[in-house]
Amino acid sequence: MKTKWSWWRWWRRQSTSQKLKLGILGAGLVLFILLSLGGIVALAIIQTLPSDQEIGSRQVAQSTKIYDRTGKILLYEIHGEERRTIVPFNEIPDTLKQATIALEDQSFYAHPAFDWRSIARAVLADVLHFQKQQGGSTITQQLAKNAFLSDEKTITRKVKELFLALRLEKRYTKDEILNLYLNQIPYGANAYGVEAAAKTFFGKDAKDLTLAESALIAALPQAPSYYSPWGVHVDELTGRKDYALEQMAKLGDITDAEKKAAQAEKLSFQPQASGIKAPHFVMAVQDYLIKKYGNDALESGGLNVITTVDMRLQEIAEKAVAEGAARNWELYKGKNAALFAEDPKTGQVLAMVGSKDYFNTEDEGNFNVATQGLRQPGSSFKPLAYVTAFKKGYTPDTILFDLQTEFDTTGIPEQSYQPNNFDNLFRGPISLRNALAQSVNIPAVKIMYLAGIDNVLKTAKDFGITTLTERSRYGLSLVLGGGEVKLSEMVGAYSVFANEGIHHDQTLVLSVQDAGGKVLEQFEDKADKVIEPQYTRLISDILSDIQARAPLYAGSLDLTVFPNRDVALKTGTTNNYVDAWSIGYTPSLVAGVWAGNNHREPLQRKGGSVLAAVPIWSAFMKAALTEYPEEVFTKPDPMPEDKPILRSDYTAGNQLHTILYYVNKNDPAGPPPANPEGDPQFDNWESAVQKWGRATIPNFDSLFNQAGSSVGGAFPSSGNIPSGTQINISSPQQGAFIQNPFSLNFDAQNDGGLQTIEIYWNENLVERIQVSGNSYSYVKALTVPSVNSQNLLRIKVVAQNGSEKTAQVIVYK
């Protein structure tokens, strides 16, 4: 206490002038200490700031943009946290620059880097309200904050902002700073910079903005989420836009008339969409870009990608798949479908729809069946076996027997393989042309054996199919779709047929440029001749033969016919109706469709390829081909053959045998085999042919296969051999819509005589007719118990010799 009072008495004894000097000295000392501490703190803060070199070399993140093949339709913008496109200062309209300055920093072109008056006003407002109400940042300070600092509201960040602003003003001109600012700041909805904002909210380039649109975009940065054009504060956003116009008029940037006109202008905003077109295609492109350039380059490198997709065809494809899948669900309980199309002359992918609805994640809509799904192709695989056989020397006129045939050579019943045809009918002798066009299974299995499994696998690989790698799994059933493939690769394989033996690598991308315009990648056609054109021309000639395929498609034939055009088509259905395929082409367009369910549930009511896939494919092709020239396929060269069996004459020399009797399977045009019985399949194939001959041809044993018979004998040619039972249903046709009763009109005939005819409706017998004679015509109105949404009408004919044949159509209510 003594010390305290002694200091106080000492102070009281000092004169007023002395006290003043001592007070000034003390205050100076305190100020010095504070300034020293402040300098130390400021120096420490400055040390954390980027250097001038870092400021100058800073790379601003830009979005990668994926466009259609025209480069005009933006499919998707890939970005990290910031979706941005840098545009030059001269492409930003003056009205947007002026509106920004009017709202954010009216003395921008006058102050050095910060505005003391604005800071003072902000401090005063904050003190009066006891909380932070206003900012005092200039445009330069805002640029410093957005480019290099965080949004934290601390004194340290503010000091950093001031120092950076001074350095930016020293390094850049005012126009350069404003340009950096307008290309940097956030406008909401992940849009950074004025170009992204103009695209996001108005669907146009920044340079095309009107005065009112410029003022509205300038109004957004103060609170982008709050002022969102898609939010609930649009009236307040409009008010801030009008305020910007008021300020512009006061500053003399616009006239009063321009202000009023802009305030009265009704603005229309872009819908807040998913932001992606052709989603399955875009995701495939994205995967390609990531693998080639990396994720960082994709999200922030500002790549400009021109793809191969044709948006006209893409929209047609999306519509065909959506409508077709909806129909399939109603009729066959098939939820999903996919479509893939390409240009066979270049390999460029023109359309890709990987599922009915990409955004329906509950049904795995984002799974791309076209490029990711491994599916059994059914009979759509057959052309690869047939073209291999043609390459080996077989001809479209070659005759095989469509008969119930045992293909096992082990003698073990459990290993027996007896394929059936889709209609459970056996046609007897049939040319390869008709067998392929009508997708008959048993001749196809025989072709697979004659061509050789390994040879067919090589053809598939040459044609671009990469998934058939487990050789030990594949037997003769591979020709019926026993191996899993991708729709995209099957379309690529069919492109080889369309392009006469030339395989082109599939591509999704035409060009890639970096943010500076440097070309990183340009489309280069990669093509290889994988087979002679003659053999692919044979396939195209068969698959475009309307007359040859008519029995298969029946009432759906019109879906496969395109007037004045050659259009080839092949379908495929797996045995359990899990997968339905349709792939067809012209010389300039190839398209494939898959229909089914992602979880592999079978299609109901025999909803195979003709019913579930062909309508989707047909809808796409008929709309797509309207802008393609009318084209025809090049006809194959004639294939004269000395061997009768290769030119459709299967009874020459009064002999009737399996083809293995006449040809060495590895050299069909060469000498006949000295010991046909040595072929492991001979006995099985031959026994079926002999059984057919005895059941079909009168006096077969006395006329055929006699010792001494020779080519040119007086026995009947194949054209005169009595045919089996024939059934022709003329009404109703396949796919027709009917009422009860309905008109039923069919003919049946058998040269050996008919016995009975039975009519079944949804597998229930509705009428049995006793018949005499070789032919019978049925014409009357048939009444059935009930008509469902889908119905099966089946006609069964029993001939005098006991053989049976059926024909059927599916009709709808």
Image (cartoon, rainbow, N blue to C red):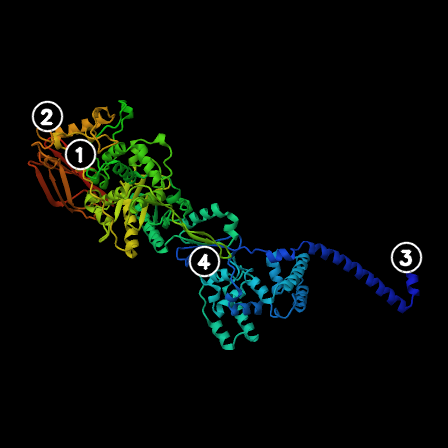
Up the image or down, 749 lies above or below 241; here it is: above
* Element at label 2: loop
**Where does the image place residue 409, in percent across and percent down from the top left?**
26, 25
Label 2, on which residue?
708
Alpha-carbon distance for marks 3 and 4? 75 Å
Mark carried by residue 4: 3
Indicate which disc, 1 or 4, sits on the residue closer to the N terminus: 4
What's the residue type where badge 1 is placed?
Lys
**Where does the image place residue 1, in percent across and percent down from the top left?**
91, 55
What's the residue type where badge 3 is placed?
Lys
Mark 1 neighbour density, 10 Å: few (under 14) some (14–19) many (20 or more): some
Label 1, on which residue?
643
Label 4, on which residue?
272
Mark 2 neighbour density, 10 Å: few (under 14) some (14–19) many (20 or more): few
* Element at label 3: helix
Closer to the camera: disc 3 or disc 2?
A: 2
What's the residue type where badge 2 is placed?
Gly
